Image (cartoon, rainbow, N blue to C red):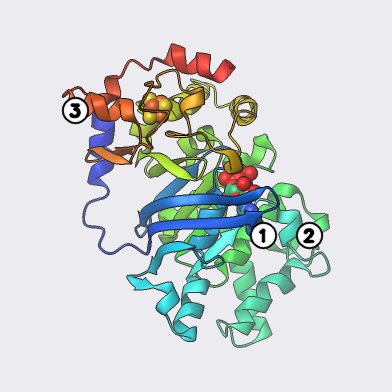
Amino acid sequence: MLDMTEQTSKDATINKGQPIIRLEHIRRDFDTRGGHITAVDDVNFDLYPSDILCLVGESGSGKTTVARMAAGLLKPTRGQVFFEGRDIYEMNKKEFGEYRRAVQIIHQDPYASLNPIHTIGDMLRAPLLKHKICKSRAEATKRAGELLELVDCRPVENFIDKYPHQLSGGQRQRISIARAMTLNPRVIIADESVSMVDVSIRVSLLNTMLKLRNELGVTFLFITHDLAVVKYFAWEGNIGVMYVGKVVEYGRTPGVIGRSVHPYTRALAAAIPEADPDLTRSKEKLQLRSLDIPKLTELPSGCVFHPRCPYWIEGLCDTTKPKLIRIDEYREVACHAVEQAVARGEDPRDLAVTDQLANQLMRE
Ligand SMILES: Nc1ncnc2c1ncn2[C@@H]1O[C@H](COP(=O)(O)OP(=O)(O)OP(=O)(O)O)[C@@H](O)[C@H]1O
Ligand code: SF4
Ligand SMILES: [Mg+2]
């Protein structure tokens, strides 16, 4: 039987129409000094208007590579990227330009992404004038003020004539968000955009982004290695859990966090502090785990998670790659043990991968 949290979440997904962005079987290979790697392998997802989709996974799992392909900054080696139903690589120049403006990325490091020699006002006015959203400098200044208000930089006079180095890290990240909003994007891709910000102001920055989604209907592709941040930001959204280039579990946030199925997701979910929203503690545990990630040039055979998995099935998990299968209306999982449980007619969410074992996995 389905739990109510998932039922409620599913209701919110009904009648959403056409996805804004669809990724279909995207793969990206790179030739690196260490050899040929597949950084992203057969990733699929749909992003609907006002959705929040979180991609979660440890360092090197392919999150940024997916983001760059979704934003049209990197061409997939295989697979297709659709924007409002159209293949972005079959668009003409004008259509591609419109798509690029509609999908904006906010990067992790606001120090690197803001030009130090321009004032905040100049930075916000430039795209407004270049793309003819505002007709005069005075109009662009007025709009820049509105954007600063939108991202909670108040009073505006304290920000508009400042240079990036005169602001705090959190304020700079708000300016990055305001700049992304100049072109009235439909989608914001936030790539680890709160991870460099002090923990004490992280929640207020997440609240500002949630406001853009709730009040303006902006769609979010939100990337993080920290499930605790997802729990706060994307409770009404979906999570795709990535492990070395593949999605291993996908579903509504409450279900994926509350009743994770894949052993890897369980290990991640076990690292979230219970009642205490101390985001740092969970981050430390994830960093410890990242030491064990296999190299993309020397991937284990079969399920790439099998050397770390307490439930690996000898002769199967070490030889055959599991496929992402749908286990109910809301959840897809790539795991042989889960597939076998489904075949036995069991609820795979009751697999004996207990939290105790997940904790054990975390300590290894
Ligand atoms: N342009 C590139 N050339 C070669 N290898 C690359 C390139 N971009 C990414 N990679 C490799 O692809 C893999 C996935 O990288 P990616 O940046 O997508 O991971 P990530 O999940 O965003 O990691 P992080 O959490 O550290 O940001 C890594 O091994 C990375 O070194
Ligand atoms: S396929 Fe096997 S090794 Fe991989 S997560 Fe499932 S049980 Fe573990
Ligand atoms: Mg990244």
306 or 106: nearer the eye? 306
Quick check: can you spot residue 137?
yes
- Residue 135, image x, y percentages: 59, 88
Q: Name the kind of residue labelled 3 in the image.
A: Ala
Residue 15 x, y percent position in the rendering: 21, 57
Left or right of 76 in this view: 18 = left
For residue 127, which quarter of the picture? bottom right
Work out whether 305 lies above or below 122.
above
Q: Nearer the viewer, mark 3 or mark 2?
A: 3
Q: Earlier in the sequence, mark 3 or mark 2?
A: 2
Q: Which mark is residue 313?
A: none
Q: Distance between the Cα atoms at labels 3 and 2?
A: 57 Å
Quadrant of the frame with the N terminus: top left
Where is mark 2, residue-wise? 164
Residue that badge 1 annotates: 175
Residue at figure coordinates x 53%, y 22% from the top left: 273
Which residue is disc 3 drawn over? 343
